[in-house]
Each structure stands twice: as structure tokens, then as C-alpha cells.
Image (cartoon, rainbow, N blue to C red):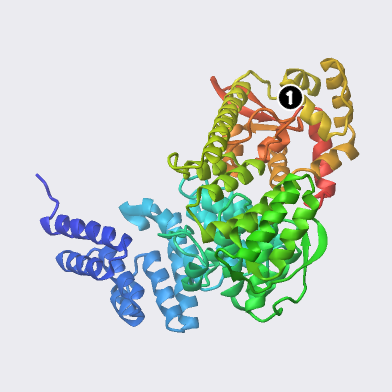
Amino acid sequence: MNQYPPELEKAEELLEAGRRLLDEGRLAEAEKRFRKAYRCYPLPAALNNWAMCRHLAGDHQGALALLEPLLQGTDPVPYSRALAARACHALGDTQGAAAALQAAIRDLDRGLRDPDLAGPAREMWIEYTLFIKQTAGILGQHRLVLELHNRWPGREEPAAAFYAGVAAFNLGRYEQAARHWRRATHPAWIPVLEAFAQVAELVALGEVPPFPLEYQDHPAVRLKKPLDEEMLATLPASGSVRMRILALLFDPKAPERRALAQGLVLYTGEWGLDLGRRLLSSNRVDLPVKLGAALALVERGVFREEEPIPAVVDGRPTTLSIRPVEMKGFDSELDRKLKEAIRLRDAGDEEAAYRLLLEMEESGHFYPPAMMTLANLMRRRGELDEAQLRLEAVERFAPDEPAVLFNLAGLWLQRGDLERAADYLSRIPRTGLRPDLAAKVAELEAYLSAELAADRLGEIWREEEDEKPIRPNITLLTALSRVPVQWLNAAAAAFGLPPVRLRKERARRLAEAMRDPERLREVLAQVSPEARDALRYVLDQGGWCKLSALTRRFGNQEGDGFWWDEQPPTSPIGQLRARCLLMVGRAALNGRRHRIAVVPAELRPLLATVLATGGDHIE
């Protein structure tokens, strides 16, 4: 006979419906379901969720009133007490909030010690640990968040790693924050927390000023349109938004970075001014980002128009200046000068053409055909940042012009970003083009197709290497004898070795160089901090680990290709592999074959010593 009361069944249906509505942000509808559920059957969960709706709606006193029956009981109610702490905090009752938080912690400790007290819903108590840690963070008790993280179960939950990272970040422990965030393994969290970790490391290096970070439910910033100046002006100056924008600023493949830098410096008060100055002097961002920062600093009155602005470009101190520019349509005088510049260029005097076009630009007139011609001369000279600034400015003026799109495709091909080059090329219509431009588009399309195919082939070949057998304690010479010759050449070049004809001799000389601690230190200075952290991780695991564990923390090798002597890999794992400091292959573990990452046995003590003595300051 079914003893399940129909009232309880109805209450649970209403409770579930209310939770779905609450997840969608439909507070009023959710509250209505929770209220009906509680009146149908007095479930504590219904009352808690009803109180949460009141709290989220700003009625904190009403939330406390709803929670009162639960708070007065003798059973442990950690969620209810933590929610009461939040309501008291919102009302400015600091003492009441602290007392309620401590009561929530005591209740949770009681339930963890005695399963009978927790009752049949004890599996929900892992969720309670997260809610209480988030509450402690909201109350500003960051050290308590870390203490509870280390003390309670559930550390493997991605939200737990997130809250611990936020606490460490707010305490100024930026490397620790990055480590916590990289421990999250859930696919929905990994990309955003990796971005957070990278920004934390930039703060630790002094590239970005410190700022506070909130303990929201999930750090993803969901936007319906791209971040640009207009969007930035409407965004809240929250730590999470700053995190996401900063991660894009320092990603050379991200679009609209000039606009992002300008907006971030404009709309974040004194912190933005500090950021703007740091961006100007940074060696980690390129000219478009610096220009965005300079524009914002002029707009905020830190510098005047045409005043020299100190900056570092391509590692060299220089100055930037912001001048007012007049957009010009067809202008007979400017067109005459452009034709003269083209004549000089075609006659072989590119320097004279370059100077003439610069003079036109410095006169304060923005003439798109001249800007495009100047940008292409800059591309020939290797001044890619300067060329990109001008081509993107012309693109804003004529976003669908085939010649503009073609030149941007060529720029990004020159910069090595084949995907972006292909994207620009795909936007060019294939009908109605001038015959000369149509021929160039077809030629570039064929070249890009071949390059992309080669990239895909390289990925396949690299993955085939990853499938070859390997032993967890492989020796250095054995490892060097098995890597493709392209990788051996890349490693030899990294260690500064002259080329030799015989592969065996090349491997022997490389092994000898790799046993030299000073040379190891110099080579480790070439790789990113993330790559050094990945190497530390493998060494801490005994010199080898499952590749899946390494990629969860430090990213995969997508885009690293195969021809490393010509195109070095960029991922942290790839950087180590291209220097033969790390090997990958298949090994039998507990009766199953897993891909593993291995540091050659002889290198382990040497690398551990170099990393320990150099720390994060290997240069």
C-alpha cells in the first residue's frame, strides 16, 4: 500500500516547478509555486526557496520572517542559517550576519559528523557546503572560505574550486587562485576559469592592477552581442566582467581589442587609469591595445590631444600621440598625392611612397584608399600592428568592401592566424569583382586551403605520435631517438645547437646540452609561466601523469601542428614537447592503455632543482 501522502507529492511537484522558474530568473512565478508548495505540505525546502525569492527581490526582512520557524527549531538547518546570514548582511546587520553564518557552520559540522541528524537528504549537504562558502565570501570572510574549502568534502565540485580561487584572489594570493581555478574539471567551467587563472597570473606579474572579485553562482558572463565601447558603457563594473575582458585583451587572437581596452579604461574609475598606464608600458600587449588605452586616457583628460604619450612598443620605449582626424570622401588633392605614392611604390621607391602617405595621415585627413595603401606598405616592412590599426579603421568605414576584406585576409595570413584569414576571405562575394581582384582572391583561397589542409594533416600526424608506446621511466636518449626529426630540430635550435648532418649525433649533442642546468634555465625562460607550471605538475606527480589530467589543468594542444621547427607550438604542453622536456605516448596502466605525459628520467632531478631555485622568476 502506498503511504506517500498526495499532499506531499503535490508539494514536491510545485517545488520542482518553482526551482526551474527560479533558475530562469522568474522570481514572482517561482515564489508563487514555493508558497503553494509550503501551504500544501510544510517542506523546509519550500520555505527556504520562498525565502530566497524574497531575498533576491530585496525584501530581506520578509526572508528572515519566513525562515524564523526553521531557525527556532533544534534540527540542523545549515542552508536556512546561511540564507539568514545573507539577509542580515543585506540589511547592514553585521553582527547578526556573522552569528548566523557561524550557526550554519556548526549545523553543517553536526550533520557531517552524524548522518542521522542530516536525514535522508544528506547528499544535498555537499550543496550546502558550497552555499555556506559562498555566503562567507559575500560577507567578506575570504580566509574562512579557504579554511572551509580545506576542511569540508566536495572540493572536487567546480563551484568549490571557483569560490576558493575567488577567496585567494581577494586575499592577494594570485598564484594560489590560479591553481584553484585550474582544478575545476567540468567542461562548462574550464574555459572561463582558465581565463580567470590567466588574469590572476597577470595581476601577480603587475601587468594588471588588483581588483575585488565577487562570489556569484557561475563566473560566465553571458552577452547577447559583442563587447564594444557602447556595450562596455552599460556593463556593471563587476570583477567578473573585468576578468573576461582582461582575458580577451591579452589574447592576440581576440577581436576588437582596441575597443575593449578603450572601454575598460574609460568606465572603471581610478582602477581604469592605472590599467591604462600599465597597458602602455606592457610588453605583453600589442599596438592596438595600447592605442585603445591611449585614446581612453586622452578622453579622461590624463593626456591632451597631440601630447606625446610614453609607451613601450615592440620592447622599445617610444611615444604615441592622439590627433583629431577628419574623414574624407573623394578628394582630388588627396587622390593626386595617393597616385604619386603609388607611382613611387611601383617604381621601386617604397621609402618615398611610405613617407608621402605618412605625411597625408599626419595632416589630419583620413582618406581610406590612402590608409589601405599605407597599411600594405607597412605589411611589407613587417609593421603588422600598425598595418592592422589602419586596415581595421578602413573596415569600420567600409565593412563590406571586397578590397578591404581581401587585405585583412592577407594581414591575418601574415600574422599566422589562418582561421581569421579564412573568415575574412569567406565574406568576399565571388561575383561582380574586378578581374584582377577576383584572381587574387582565388589565389589566396587556394593557398589558404592548402595551408589549412596542412594544419589538419599536422594535427593528425601529431596525434599519431601521441599513440605510440612509451614507458613512464623512459630515458633521455631513448626519447630523443623516437621523436620526429622536426621536433628534434626544434629542440636543438631552442638549446642553441648548430645543425649537424647525422640524426644520431644531433640527439647525442642535444642530450648533453639538456643535462646542463644553466642551459635548462635559459630554455625554461623561453616558455610561458603556464608551461613551467605544467612541468612542475608532472614532476610533482613523480615525473609522469595521465595526459588527460594535464590537459584539464593546462589546456589541450589544439592548433599546435606538427612542423615545430618551422611553426613552434603555442600551448603550454606543446612548448615543453618542442624542447623535448616532455614526451607523450600510450602506456598500460592497471590493465588499460592510457595516454601519458613523461619527463625523461635523467632530467627530473635537474628540472626540479632549476624550477625550485628559479621559481616563477626564470628570465
| Position in image of residue 580 (x %, y %) | 76, 30
Residue occupying the point 69% across, 60% down: 337
User: 488 or 478: nearer the eye?
Assistant: 488
Query: Quarter of the image holding residue 532?
Result: top right
* Up/down of 212 relative to 343, above or below: below
Q: Is residue 68 visible?
A: yes
- Identity of the residue furthest to the bottom in this view: 92
Query: Quarter of the image holding residue 516?
Result: top right
| Position in image of residue 255 (x %, y %) | 56, 54
* Up/down of 202 relative to 470, above or below: below
User: 588 or 408: nearer the eye?
Assistant: 408
- Identity of the residue furthest to the left in this view: 1
Q: Is residue 256 visible?
A: no
Give the left or right position of residue 134, taking residue 279 as reference.
Answer: left
User: 617 or 443: nearer the eye?
Assistant: 443
* Up/down of 34 relative to 92, above or below: above
Q: How many marks?
A: 1
Quadrant the N terminus occupies: top left
- Which residue is disc 1 drawn over? 486
Residue type at numbered disc 1: Gln
User: 126 or 557: nearer the eye?
Assistant: 557
| Position in image of residue 281 (x %, y %) | 76, 64
Residue occupying the point 85% across, 21% down: 506
Query: Quarter of the image holding residue 443?
Result: top right
For label 1, the SS is helix
Residue occupying the point 77% across, 22% down: 480
Give the left or right position of residue 397, taking residue 312 as reference.
Answer: left
| Position in image of residue 83 (x %, y %) | 39, 70
Residue occupying the point 49% across, 55% down: 399
